[in-house]
Amino acid sequence: MIVNFRAKKINRGRFIITLRLGIIRFVFQLALVQDTLGIASGEPFKSPQVLFWDFINTPKYLIERSLRHIQFKFNLGNIYLFQSGNRNSFRAICIDLIPLEQAQTIIMQTNYVDKEFVKYFLTYGYKTIRVIEKSRDKEPNYFVRVLNSTTEYRYVKYIKSNCHALHLLKLGVIMQQEYDYLDNHGYLDNSKPQDLIIELYETQYRGK
């Protein structure tokens, strides 16, 4: 009986394993994973949701152009952009509270968003992204910039998530002056810091 074993590296942390036993061949895909902490956009299949985006292998200028377009089209508030390490991998968050179906529509109409990210959002009715102070991931998560709303009434159309705003305030992403403005004008909901859903999930381990 012919026995053959091969392992092929696809990329950092991901492998294809091929095992042949006689006329039967088994093919496995293995990935090194790690536990990662992230914040959730809301409760599964419930409204409202804040907006999360995930972009992979896309230049920053294209992402910003895409987010600017969707921000203007749907009259969204500020969008906060983050980068994973030195790769062309970015995440974005808008703390506007959007009805679930409309949030899914906005994400689907945004160019360059990771297809698996969109698929997960449509399947499970929420999404988690890594926007936290510390992570076990060796690849730091950097705040890049804020894309300020381009509309005159940027704070009026949607109420903002207070628990998400407080989290970004803690990270130094939202400035105290901006938070006070939202709070004083009644543009924040009644959620508290403990209402923020923090989830432990698996991501691919990329090593150094």
Image (spheres, grey):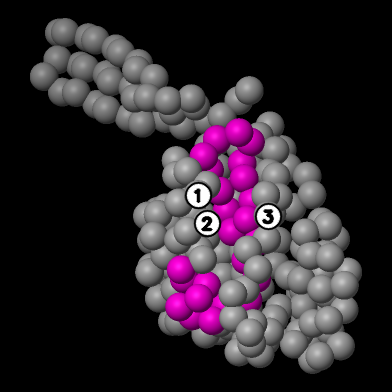
Asked if residue 62 shows in the view, the reply is yes
Cα separation, mark 1 vs mark 3, equals 12 Å
Kind of residue sitting beneath label 2: Glu
Q: Left of 203 or right of it: where is 27?
A: left
Residue at point 68%, 44% (across, down): 141
Q: Which residue is mark 3?
A: 145
Q: Which residue is mark 1?
A: 61
Residue at point 75%, 87% (across, down): 187
Q: In this rendering, is residue 14 above or below 137?
A: above
Q: Position of residue 20 (x, y in %)?
A: 21, 17
The image quadrant where one finds the C terminus is top right
**Magenta part of the protein: which range?**
69-92
Cα separation, mark 2 vs mark 3, equals 10 Å
Q: Left of 58 or right of it: where is 93?
A: right
Foreground of the two, 118 or 155: 155
Q: Which residue is mark 2?
A: 64
> Could you tell me if the residues under marks 1 and 3 are in contact, i.e. CB atoms within 8 Å?
no
Q: Position of residue 190 (x, y in %)?
A: 79, 87
Q: In this rendering, is residue 74 above or below 8?
A: below
Kind of residue sitting beneath label 3: Arg
> Could you tell me if the residues under marks 2 and 1 are in contact, i.e. CB atoms within 8 Å?
yes
Q: Left of 193 or right of it: where is 67?
A: left
Q: Secondary structure at mark 3?
A: strand
Q: Position of residue 126 (x, y in %)?
A: 53, 69
Residue at point 84%, 65% (across, down): 175
Q: Secondary structure at mark 2?
A: helix
Kind of residue sitting beneath label 1: Tyr
Cα separation, mark 2 vs mark 1, equals 5 Å
Q: Secondary structure at mark 1?
A: helix
Q: How many marks?
A: 3
Q: Position of residue 1 (x, y in %)?
A: 15, 8
In magenta stretch: residue 86: yes
